[in-house]
Image (cartoon, rainbow, N blue to C red):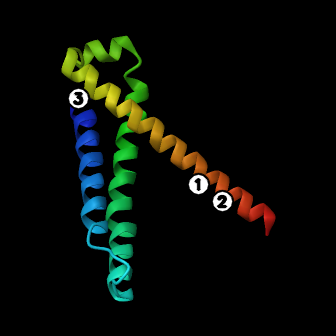
Amino acid sequence: MRSIQFLGLLTSIVSFLCLFWALAPLSPDSSASVEGAIGLFLMFGVASLFGFSALLLIPSSIALFNAKLRANTYFYGKFWYSVWGINSLISVGYVFVILYIGYIYLTLKVSN
């Protein structure tokens, strides 16, 4: 469980860094081909990293509410509780984004 939580945190940090790295060189003077290439990288690279991170963090953060599981996987101490807290906040953010995308999809589908 510790490795899943740490890998999820590491993946979310890497995905945020890739997001900023990809969007930093964009300017109003950028050509359309550069913008298209960055869009493809965001769609296939960064979005897949965010998805992988969400698949790791959401179920494992929920599972760690069980005290017996935390004891069996040696998930205790200030460091691991802080990792769990950060990952829980990231998981809540992922859930809100998923719900928002679902809401937008349903409202656009119903209005058409």
Tell me whether the residue at label 3 lies in contact with that at label 1, contact meaning CB atoms closer than 8 angstroms: no
Q: Tell me the crowding category of disc 1: few under 14, some 14 to 19, or many 20 or more residues within 10 angstroms, Cα based.
A: few
Q: Looking at this view, name the residue that lies furthest to the right.
A: 111
Q: CA distance from mark 3 to mark 1?
A: 30 Å
Tell me whether the residue at label 2 lies in contact with that at label 1, contact meaning CB atoms closer than 8 angstroms: yes
The percent coordinates of residue 84 (x first, y second) are 31, 26
Which of the 4 quarters of the picture holds residue 44?
A: bottom left
Tell me whether the residue at label 2 lies in contact with that at label 3, contact meaning CB atoms closer than 8 angstroms: no
Which residue is nearer to you in this view: 28 or 39?
A: 28
**Mark 3 = which residue?**
2
Of circles 2 and 3, the one toward us is: 2
Residue at image position (62%, 53%) is 102
**Mark 1 = which residue?**
101
Which residue is nearer to you in this view: 67 or 96?
A: 96
Give left or right: position of 70 versus 103: left
Give left or right: position of 9 versus 40: left
Question: Looking at the picture, which amino acid does disc 3 mark?
Answer: Arg
Q: Secondary structure at mark 2?
A: helix
Indicate whether 11 appears above or below 112.
above
Q: CA distance from mark 2 to mark 3?
A: 35 Å
Residue at image position (30%, 47%) is 12
Q: Tell me the crowding category of disc 3: few under 14, some 14 to 19, or many 20 or more residues within 10 angstroms, Cα based.
A: some
Dot 3 or dot 1: first in sequence order is: 3
Question: Looking at the picture, which amino acid does disc 1 mark?
Answer: Ile
Residue 105, disc: 2
